[in-house]
Amino acid sequence: MRDVRVTVLGTAQDGGVPQPGCMRECCKIIRSGEGLRRFPVSLGIVGSDGSAHLIEASRSMGEQFEIWDLVEPNIQPLNSLSLTHSHLGHIDGLGLFGKEVMGLHGLTVHCSESVASLIERNPVWNLLCEDGVINPTLWKANEAFEPSVGCGFRIKPIPIPHRDELSDNHAIIIEGLNCKLLFMPDHDAWTDTLSGQTIREWLSGLEIDIALIDGTFWDSNELQHRDLSEIPHPTVCESMERLGSRAINDPDIRFLHLNHTNPLCNPDSPELAELTSMGWGLVKEGDSFTLERL
């Protein structure tokens, strides 16, 4: 038996970086080969028994599995998938499990009732259910479960307010023996998520050691041609203002789900230097975290 390893397979907002249709310099430089490509947010978890578990199903799964294989060579076939919600980059890779690509059978898909209902109503995804490719399995909010027997870790879904035009949204806590990792790529606003608490108080109440949180936009001026109220996310600047500098007993907080316009995508940006100077971080594809098995 081994300890549990969580690998970051994607760090971008749903469109990835570079984003399709973007002709701005932020994406042109990456297409030229000079910048860092990013894929929609996803995690891969290898349990203590060697079982393989995926968080989010993006259309970039092929590239993400290559990243995963570099960290965890000879990964077993997937034992489970967990879906936080139904926005584009988190669920649009479901079809890759079907006969046209992977040809899986009986893949357990852990999700909320509203996500499962959407899968059932979508004729393409429902066909996966009818063909026995996937098996949506409902979780209960705030109740931890083993995604497969003997995997050595638990997943605990936490309801988080976010645009619910298609389904509800959850953050996921991955629980090892002495470490809890929070995966929260999407939420509307800190005021809604925290319900009067500070970020530190909220994370402390959940007993979080490592927090991978929504960093979609750097600030509110980032998208001049879009109304950010239509795509609400707390900015990294607001999160930094709420947090201040990292104290010795604070959890390890790192940002992900970056929009292609976010200056944090540039490793040489002054914004990233400011973030790290305060003691907070940014995750990149291939980063991994080890959790002691339960």
Image (spheres, rainbow, N blue to C red):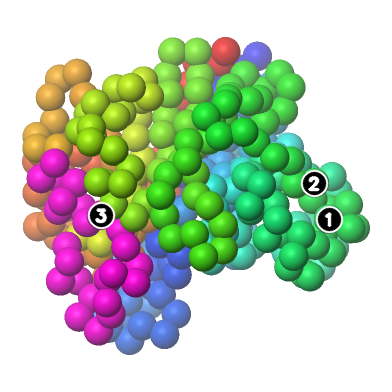
* Residue type, label 1: Cys
Q: Earlier in the sequence, mark 3 or mark 1?
A: 1
Q: Which residues are magenta?
A: 219-242
| As drawn, 157 above or below 36 | above
Check disc 3 and report its element: helix, strand or loop: loop
Residue at numbered disc 1: 129
Q: Residues within 10 Å of mark 3 (few under 14, many from 20)?
A: many
Residue 64 position by quadrant = bottom right
**84 within the magenta span:** no
Left or right, 192 with reference to 250 = right
Residue at the location (13% across, 41% down)? 242
Is any atom of residue 189 visible in this view? yes
Image quadrant for the C terminus?
top right
Who is closer to the viewer here, 211 or 162? 162
Q: Which quarter shows the N terminus?
A: top right
Please give the name of the residue rendered at 25% of the width and 62% of the height, measured from the top-left corner.
Answer: 217
- Badge 3 is on which residue? 234
Q: Where in the figure is residue 184, as x and y percent of width and height?
A: 40, 44
Q: Residue 159, how many percent across, how many down?
A: 47, 41
Pointer 2: what residue? Answer: 135
The tag earlier along the polypeptide, 1 or 2, is 1
Separation of marks 3 and 2 at Cα, in angstroms: 34 Å
Left or right for 15, reference 244: right
Q: Is residue 218 above or below residue 55?
A: below
Q: Which quadrant holds residue 79?
A: top right
Cβ atoms under marks 1 and 2 closer than 8 Å: yes
* Mark closer to the chain start, 3 or 2: 2
Q: Secondary structure at mark 1?
A: helix
Residue 17: percent from the left, percent from the top? Answer: 39, 68
